[in-house]
Image (cartoon, rainbow, N blue to C red):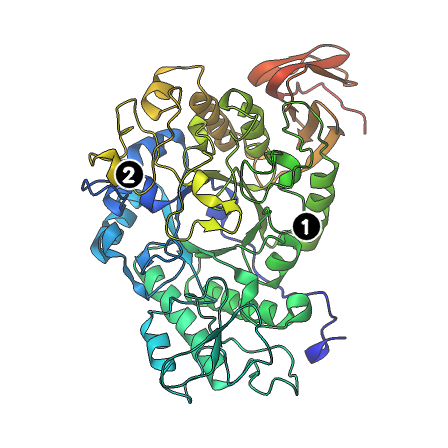
Amino acid sequence: MGFNGQPIGTAPVRAHRRPPSWLSEAVVYQIYPATFADSDGDGIGDLRGVRDHLDHLDWLGVDTLWLSPCFASPFGDGGYDVSDYLTVAPRYGSNEDADALIEAARARGMRIMLDLVPGHTSHQHPWFQAAVQDPDDHRYIWSDRVASPVRGWIPNHAARGGYYLANFYPIQPALNFGYARPDPAEPWRQPVDAAGPRANRAALREIMGHWFDRGVSGFRVDMAASLVKDDPGFVETGRLWGEMREWIDREHPGRILLSEWGDPKTAVPAGFHADFFLHFTGPALRSLWDNGTGSQGPWADGRPCYFDPDGRGSMSTFLEAWREADAAIDGTGHVALPTANHDFSRLACGPRTRDMVAPAFAFLLTWPSVPVVYYGDEIGMRYVPGVPDKEGSQLDSEARQGSRTPMQWDGSAGAGFSEAAEDRFYLPLDPDGDRPDVAAARADEGSLLHHVRRLIALRRQTPALGTGGTVRVLHQDYPFVYLRGDRHLVVVNGRREPATAPWPATGSAPRALAAHGVEVTGSDIRAAGFSYGVYELAPDAAVPA
């Protein structure tokens, strides 16, 4: 057993309310503000730029926009080093611009979520500037000494001296939420109920409440598992987030927390409304669409994935993780499944081109998870290798900047991203002469963009395809075949070669709702390369168990 009677290896489980219905029905769209749309010609995206493109996002069908950090920051790590949680970074506009974006989104039936970085601040945050001088300030984690150079401990050259603990880069000092267990060899460890940890919990509620009151619908929580240190089984970390969940449900009903934990079976029972399958925790996400090329994108492990063009993968790894998470969550929240993000390579990466990824979107938008579309993936923007480091984007050998290049809105020289000269762009554009753009894709009914739009619309029109319906796998190989509810058949073939599966159902032929290269006959299912199909079964159809 662990501390407080909790078994080591499991965070505490609370009886939480079910998540708000809007989250259960959401299609989330992640925006990296610096490279989405520049409204003032300085080469950096901003909130007005996002607002200027809400009509397009509304047309696409997404209804929840998640913005990567837009708070004041010295941008040593792309804004994940916050110097003021209550103020929008001047490069992105003002708090009034945030208000205007929230209101404009609301007018279109859309919600805004912000990125919350709770575990650390910038070294330029006023809290830290005070702490480096005052040995009685315990908002951060301090030691008078370290026995030997230890990764994460940074010497303090100000009046206080000693060392502070950094969560990530040295410019990101860890906020003190306490340690789950003491260690006589480290007397500076504080318990989770010490004054410093209590002050930081109160500050978290103040920050979230400030933005909830301005109309924000929720937060994606960065490094959500990192708060309490030396916490076997994340027992105290889970207790912290469980308390935050109860506070939100009580004081701000309808608002949500989506965690960057990467372990839904732990994070959701602990208190989050949803958690991602992510590339850095477990193989589930990478087993779907890891780029498989090692050096081509961040955190690629090179193992086969299901949406590998050569068809070397399997759905078994994903399904095992899904079933485990679904059983643990038990209706109290959701798994979120992203196409990519600011740290992980895009769907179009390495050998996988935009002409190959429509089946991945078909899976994403018909599986009972919350779909999260990374900006540009809907037109097939690719992970761009060889992009220079920008504001901490190069993490050791991982070139995260390849997934952060400017949104491609049209075929002009600047791709419609900015009127600035291209040498002033936050990051360079994809130099590929065949790069996709929104304008061209909207004009082409056969484009990936239109596939995605139709699939989003179909999900909205068909409740059985959403988070609430059941799922039953009929064929686990190529093609992947499953039933949503009792009446909706989904077929996905993520490889180049055609594939077949048996179709043992009796009764009338199913009706195609969205068919792209798939044919259902009386005895089998035939799927062309990179194909998908969504069908409604006839009332007299029966599929044997």
The amino acid type, in three-letter code, at marker 1 is: Ala
Q: Sequence order check: which comes first, mark 2 or mark 1? A: 2
Q: Quadrant of residue 208?
A: bottom left
The amino acid type, in three-letter code, at marker 2 is: Ala
Q: Quadrant of residue 515?
A: top right
Q: Are the residues tagged 2 and 1 within 8 Å (C-beta)?
A: no
In the picture, the quarter occupied by the N terminus is bottom right
Whether residue 113 is visible here, answered yes or no, is yes
User: On the image, numbered disc 2 is attached to which residue?
Assistant: 37
User: On the image, numbered disc 1 is attached to which residue?
Assistant: 325
How dense is the environment of label 1, judged by Cα within 10 Å: few (below 14), some, or many (20 and up)?
A: many
In the picture, the quarter occupied by the C terminus is top right
Q: Which mark is residue 190?
A: none
CA gap between label 2 and label 1 equals 36 Å
- The x and y percentages for residue 190 are 55, 84
How dense is the environment of label 2, judged by Cα within 10 Å: few (below 14), some, or many (20 and up)?
A: many
Label 2: which secondary element: loop
